Image (cartoon, rainbow, N blue to C red):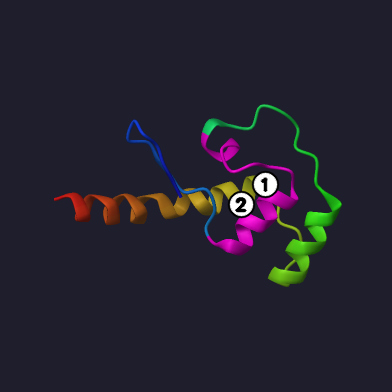
């Protein structure tokens, strides 16, 4: 998750496996927050690491970001419950 100094809140990845796939696809964590302004290039060594540790096929960046976005309402509710 990303907690910004200005109150920004964003889920970077749904879980560690998705985070590994983001990195393997050549996407840095802040790019999921600020936007991807380039064509990411997969990193072969990290693709092998992600495959080995997740046991799943390569996941596209758009699907990874969409899965993380689904988790944002629950994270927002959790953060808000702790501040009330």
Left or right: residue 11 compared with residue 78:
right
Q: Considering the whole magenta stretch, tell me its main secondary structure.
A: helix
As drawn, the label of residue 61 is 1
Q: Is residue 45 left or right of residue 61?
A: right
Is 71 on the left or on the right of 44, as rendered? Answer: left
Q: Around disc 1, counting alpha carbons within 10 Å, would you say few (fewer than 14), some (14 to 19), or many (20 or more)?
A: some
Residue 73 locus on image (x, y percent)? 35, 51
Q: Is residue 37 magenta?
A: no
Work out whether 75 lies above or below 3. Answer: below
As drawn, the residue found furthest toward the right would be 44
Between residue 20 and residue 67, name the one nearer to us: 20
Q: Which residue is mark 2?
A: 64
**Residue at horizontal 74 percent and vertical 43 percent from the top:** 26
Residue at figure coordinates x 54%, y 31% from the top left: 34
How many numbered dots are placed on residues in this image?
A: 2
Residue bounds of the magenta highlight: 15-33
Indicate the quadrant where residue 49 lies. Answer: bottom right
Place of residue 24 in the rendered image (x, y in percent of width and height, measured from the top left): 74, 52
- Please report the residue visible at 71 percent of the width from the left and 70 percent of the height from the top: 53
* Residue lying at the far top of the rendered structure: 37
Give the label on residue 77, or none.
none
Q: Decide: marks 2, 1 in contact (CB < 8 A)?
A: yes
Q: Quadrant of residue 55?
A: bottom right
Question: For this view, does 55 lie left or right of residue 13?
Answer: right
40 in relation to 24, above or below: above
- Residue farthest left in this picture: 84
Return the residue nearer the eye: 80 or 6.
6
The local secondary structure at tag 1 comes to helix
**How crowded is the residue under tag 2: few (<14 C-alpha within 10 Å), some, or many (20+)?**
many
Residue 23 on the magenta segment:
yes
For label 2, the SS is helix
């Amino acid at each position: 998750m990303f907690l910004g100094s200005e109150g920004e809140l964003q889920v970077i990845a749904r879980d560690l496996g998705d985070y590994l796939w983001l990195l393997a696809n050549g996407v840095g964590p802040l790019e999921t927050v600020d936007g991807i302004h380039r064509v990411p290039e997969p990193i072969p060594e990290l693709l092998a690491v992600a495959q080995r540790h997740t046991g799943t096929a390569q996941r596209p960046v758009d699907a990874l970001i969409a899965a993380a976005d689904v988790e944002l309402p629950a994270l927002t509710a959790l953060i808000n419950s702790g501040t009330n």
